[in-house]
Amino acid sequence: MQIDWINFTPWWSLAGGALIGLAAALLINLNGRVMGASSILGGLFGARSGATWRLSFLAGLIAPALFVNATGGVKPHFLAGTATLIVAGLLVGFGTRLGSGCTSGHGVCGIARLSPRSMAATVVFMLAGFATVYAVRHVLAAGAS
Amino acid sequence: MKHLTAFAIGLLFGIGLLSSGMNLPGKVLGFLDLLGRWDPSLLFVMGGAIPVAAIGFALARKRTKSLLGEPLSRPDRTEIDVRLLGGALIFGIGWGLAGVCPGPAIINLGFFTGPAIVFFAAMIAGMIAFEFLNRLRNAP
């Protein structure tokens, strides 16, 4: 293992993480809801109610990006091609709903609640992510060259 | 009131995700590239988020209703089953292919780029496909 010191941002990531944790703490105490991005978004398509608070939350979530974009901030660069993005998006959408959560719901809130279910899910999606990137970057890419 | 707090909390979450760099697919893939040149930043995001969130959930545990009088959601399922782990596995593969999870997928829409829109649309299609199959399965 080699650390990528050029891209490593410990302080910004720690501070951003603390804000994410604060948001989760406020949402459970004020609105009584667990802050999981996939559940808040996906709940719009299920039978569950609460479309208006979900949309309010999502509007807040996208607003800082609209601001950064309007003020000439750097647009995030996607490394994958269109076909890969479509497959990946389908898997992320389907998988997070089947598994009842994603990085925020299981990875942050679930672990903070000491939920064994969320810990198990987090271990599985992390390992699957590691394995997928390993396969794409170190097996398939090596085979192609 | 609950819509105002939901919006403000969404804002905080968005600012947190943007400042942590977790909306950048390259940065997330750098974290997932454990055996390449590894960027441990995502661990620091979780390290910053989990303790703060844990205090919030510990405070909420003592309550019967939220501060705004809403019912408190308490996920009470304990079973670690095929559905949970299969869902996590499918999500993890998609995450590893693109470097985007649901929160950042929503945020990146705000930059109006083609790839961000394509990923978001596919993710919504995946969520709707789940609802459809789930209803078929639960139908009498």
Image (tube, coloured by chain):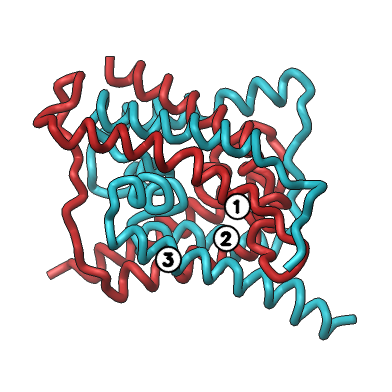
Chain colours: A cyan, B red
Q: Do the residues labelled 2 and 1 touch (CB within 8 Å)?
A: yes
- In the foreground, B131 or B60: B60
Counting every numbered tag in the picture gives 3
Chain containing the residue with disc 1: B
Q: In what quadrant of the picture does the C terminus of chain B appear?
A: bottom left
- Of the residues under marks 3 and 2, which one precedes in the sequence? 3
The local secondary structure at tag 2 comes to helix
Q: What residue type is labelled 2?
A: Trp
Which residue bears the numbered disc 3? B88
Looking at the rendering, in which quadrant would you find the N terminus of chain B? Answer: top left
User: Is B13 located above or below residue A114 in the figure?
Assistant: above
Residue B47 position in % (x across, y down):
50, 44
Marks 2/1: CA–CA distance: 6 Å
The chain that hosts pointer 3 is B
For the residues labelled 1 and 3, say whether their Cβ atoms are less than 8 Å apart: no
Name the amino acid, label 1.
Val
Instruction: Name which of mark 1 and mark 3 comes first in the sequence.
Output: 3
| Mark 1 lies on residue | B100
Distance from disc 1 to disc 3, alpha carbons, whole Å, reads 14 Å
A33, above or below B35, in the image: above
Within 10 Å of disc 3 (Cα), the crowding (few <14, some 14-19, many 20+) is many
